[in-house]
Amino acid sequence: MPPYLSIPHFHLSKLPLTTKVALTCFSLALLFAILFVTIAVFGDRTDYETKGVQANFAGDERVTRETGAKFEKMYTEHKKRSIYDIVHPHSFMMPLIYFVLCHLMEMTYAPRGLKIGLYVGAFVAMMLVIFSPLLVWTNIALAPVVIPAVVGMGFAFIVMLVLPTFQMWFPGKAA
C-alpha cells in the first residue's frame, strides 16, 4: 500500500532528510526544465502566437498559402514521420512525469477538489500538448488550442511540484 493511503496519513514532512533532499532536487530540476521548455523553447519556436504554432509544425509556406500570414523567418515544413518522431518520445515521458507529480500531490494536505481539478486539468493539457504537433500538422486551424494547453500544463505541473516541496519542508499545523 502506498504510504499516502495508510492510516494515519503519511505526510511528506515525515520523510527522512535524504529523501527530502532527493525529492527537492528532483522538483527543482523538473521546475527548471518546465520553465525552460515553456518560456525559452516554446517561445523561440512560436513567439506565443497562433501563426507561430502553425508555422512551427506545418511550415511557413503552408501557413502563408492557407492563411495569408507572412513571416520574417523561415519555418521548415515537417513530414509525417518527423511529426511522429516529435510525438513518440513525449507520449511516453510526459505521462511518467505526470504520474510522479500525482503521487507527490497525494501526499499533501491539499483539498480533494483541488487535487482532482489539478489531475484532470493537467491530464487534458498534457494530452493536447503531446499530440499538438500532429493535430496542427493535420489541421492548422487547431493551433489556437496549443498555447493555452502549454500554459495550462506548465501551471498545473508547477503547482504539483511546488506545493508538495513546500509542505515537505514547512508542514505547518496540518502535519
Image (tube, rainbow, N blue to C red):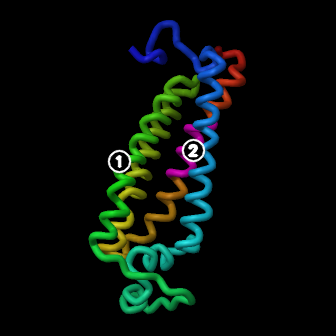
Numbered label attached to residue 103: none
Mark 2, Cα crowd under 10 Å, few <14 / some 14-19 / many 20+, is: some
Figure quadrant of the N terminus: top left
Residue at image coords 61%, 45% = 31
Residue at image coords 58%, 71% = 44
Spatial CA span between label 1 and label 2: 16 Å
Residue at disc 1, secondary structure: helix
Amino acid on which the number 1 mark rests in the picture = Phe
Mark 1, Cα crowd under 10 Å, few <14 / some 14-19 / many 20+, is: few
Depth check: 47 or 29 in front?
Answer: 29
Please report whichever mark, 1 or 2, sits nearer to the chain's N-terminal start. 2
Picture quarter containing residue 83?
bottom left
Q: Is residue 39 left or right of residue 152?
A: right
Quickly name the residue at label 1.
92
Picture quarter containing residue 142?
bottom left
Quickly name the residue at label 2.
30
Please state the horizontal and vertical placement of residue 167, each as a whole percent of the image: 65, 26
The magenta span reads 153-162
Amino acid on which the number 2 mark rests in the picture = Leu
Please state the horizontal and vertical placement of residue 164, each as a whole percent of the image: 60, 30
